[in-house]
Amino acid sequence: MMMDLVARDQKVIWHPYTQMQNALPHIPIVRGEGVYLYDQEGKKYIDAVSSWWVNIHGHAHPHIAQRVASQLQVLEHVIFAGFTHEPAVTLAERLLPLLPGKQEKLFYSDNGSTAVEVALKMALQYWNNTERPQKKKILAFKDAYHGDTFGAMSVSGRSIFTQPFNDFLFDVVFIDLPNQNNILALQAEISSLHAEVACFIFEPLVLGAGGMQMYGAPYLDQLLATCAAHGILTIADEVMTGFGRTGTYFACEQLQNRPDLFCLSKGLTGGTMPMGVTTCNEKVFNAFLSDDKLKTLYHGHSFTANPVACAASLASLDLLLEPETLANLDRIKASHQEFFLKIKDHPKVKSVRQTGTIIALEWETGNDTSYLSSWRDRLYTYFLEKGIVLRPLGNIVYILPPYVISNEDLTYIYTTIEQALAEL
Ligand SMILES: *Cc1c(COP(=O)(O)O)cnc(C)c1O
């Protein structure tokens, strides 16, 4: 019996971040091409959020598809302890030198949350291995988002996402985003705690799920300098900001100081397959070299370094490094900046901010500003009807497009936002 896909979905699927009792119907997507998604009826949507920030080169990119297809015919997977393969080694060889600072080793996992878990375990075990087990505290930003597994949740801000689990999360020292006024106090706080602090984990320049909050590179630089002076390990979570999103290949390129570890995922495979990586410098890696087996990093996943995902990542890197991609990053940034100036004084716009290819505007909704704001569904539905996938974080509407988006499509999104400001 042929049943409508929406009805079949409702019978068997539990969707992420979704109250299933009153969920809006899930739209069946049958095809993607470039920035467009096509539903069953042939309706076209601009994917203005890059399908949860992962898609950087457009949907069903032929270069990535071809590399994935040929890898599948040669080697689909192999256990990664005791064995290795060309795509995993080549990807590490190509990726490590692209990262700012001297990153020496790359560890594969499956997604952004696992990349964060691995980084935290590396940092905590580093102090164990170097006989300073009293360094147990972790520093993180109050509104940070680092993922949904328990360690990643622990270092994320306490929110409605974590509420039922708060009792099970480990203690973290949360600090405010740095700015001109609080930077000295933050540095003093870090200095006073340094004997107990193992590491500082941060999203550089933009806090994604925390509402696309943006903060200045110079202040982050000062925090990193303080951490470095006290031997606190620093972990850059570039899961969202990596691979061009903030206008440079990696957000940390915009800093003087270099983190000890990086977490990458989302754009890594161009948004085609799940994969995460954690990289570290020589100092971190060397602390695990020992005749003592207890100093080993006992961590791995069944699909660690999956060759097909590595092939997708290599193909995505080819595209990222084309001069045209950098030109696109500059073009989107300039276009966003123009819209920024146009919209910034609009009475219904509380604030606008922009970093690289991301622009976020906060809707004036009085006191109704939470993630659960009723405005969220009104805005979401409004844009969907106009053929644009925008997924507001509460009252914050942001555009985070694949880099291949055309000027015409950008203009259409801006115009539709202006229309929404006038009509809603
Ligand atoms: C999305 C995200 C994660 C989690 O990645 P998943 O692949 O969804 O587990 C971690 N850190 C940041 C900054 C993210 O944006």
Image: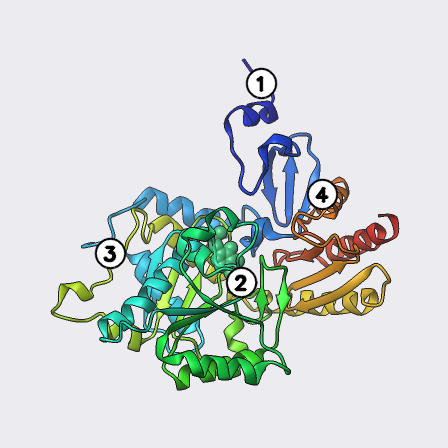
In this figure, which residue is indicated by the disc labeled 2? 144
Q: Quadrant of residue 83?
A: bottom left
Say what amino acid the circle numbered 1 marks. Met
Q: Provide the residue designation for mark 1.
A: 3
Label 4 beta carbon within 8 A of ligand 1: no
Depth check, mark 4 against mark 1: the one in front is 4
Residue 42 vs 111, above or below: the answer is: above
Mark 2 CB within 8 Å of ligand 1:
yes
User: Mark 2 and mark 3 in contact (Cβ < 8 Å)?
Assistant: no
- Confirm or deny contact between disc 4 and disc 2 (CB under 8 A): no
Look at the numbered disc 1 and give the secondary structure of its residue.
Answer: loop
Residue 311: tell me if it is visible.
Answer: no
Q: Is residue 159 above or below residue 342?
A: above
Gap between marks 4 and 1 measured at Cα: 27 Å
| Foreground: disc 4 or disc 3 | 4
Q: Which residue is mark 4?
A: 377
Give me the C-alpha separation between circle 3 and circle 2. Answer: 35 Å
Q: Is residue 258 visible?
A: yes
Q: Earlier in the sequence, mark 1 or mark 2?
A: 1
* Residue name at image x 39 percent, y 84 percent: 230
Residue positioned 65% across, 63% down in the render: 358
Residue nearest the viewer, comparing 258 with 191: 191
| Type of amino acid at the residue the image marks with label 3 | Thr
Q: Secondary structure at mark 3?
A: loop
Q: Mark 3 highlights which residue?
A: 84
User: Counting other residues with Cα less than 10 Å from the Cα at mark 3, is it few (<14), some (14-19), or many (20 or more)?
Assistant: few
Q: Residue 308, position in %: x, y? A: 37, 48
